[in-house]
Amino acid sequence: MMDFDHQINLEHLLFFDRKCRVCKKVKNLMDDFYLTRKNRASFASAYSYECKECTIKRIQKSRKEKKMLDEYEYQYPDW
């Protein structure tokens, strides 16, 4: 009888690279993607599909747009 526990490592079951759905670049799963489910850190599905760089850009852009909209809302009309 063969012992499969010694032949299979956790490394063989995990994906280490993932393609970002925004920038389409293949990056390291553990380093370049945010963990979305902390209780399942060993699964690839616990990481987001958007890389950290793209996530930061998206958040910054949405905050700038919201700030600009807020500035225009509180001004008096020109009439």
Image: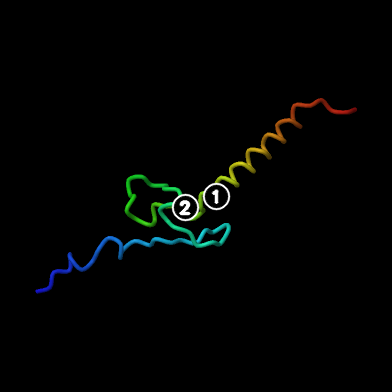
The residue furthest bottom is 1
Instruction: Give residue 32's mark.
Output: 2
Q: Which secondary structure, mark 1?
A: helix
Q: Which secondary structure, mark 2?
A: helix
Q: Quadrant of the N terminus?
A: bottom left
Residue positioned 42% across, 47% down in the render? 36
Q: Quadrant of residue 61?
A: top right
CB under 8 Å between discs 2 and 1? yes
- Counting from the top left corner in percent of width and height, residue 11 is at 30, 62
Q: Quadrant of residue 7?
A: bottom left
Question: Which residue position is annotated with label 1?
Answer: 53
Vertical position of residue 55 compared to residue 2: above or below: above
- Counting from the top left corner in percent of width and height, residue 43 is at 34, 55
Q: Which one is earlier in the sequence, the residue at label 2 or at label 1? A: 2
- Counting from the top left corner in percent of width and height, residue 38 is at 36, 45
Residue positioned 39% across, 60% down in the render? 16
| Three-letter residue code for mark 2 | Asp
Along the horizontal axis of the image, is 4 left or right of 20? left
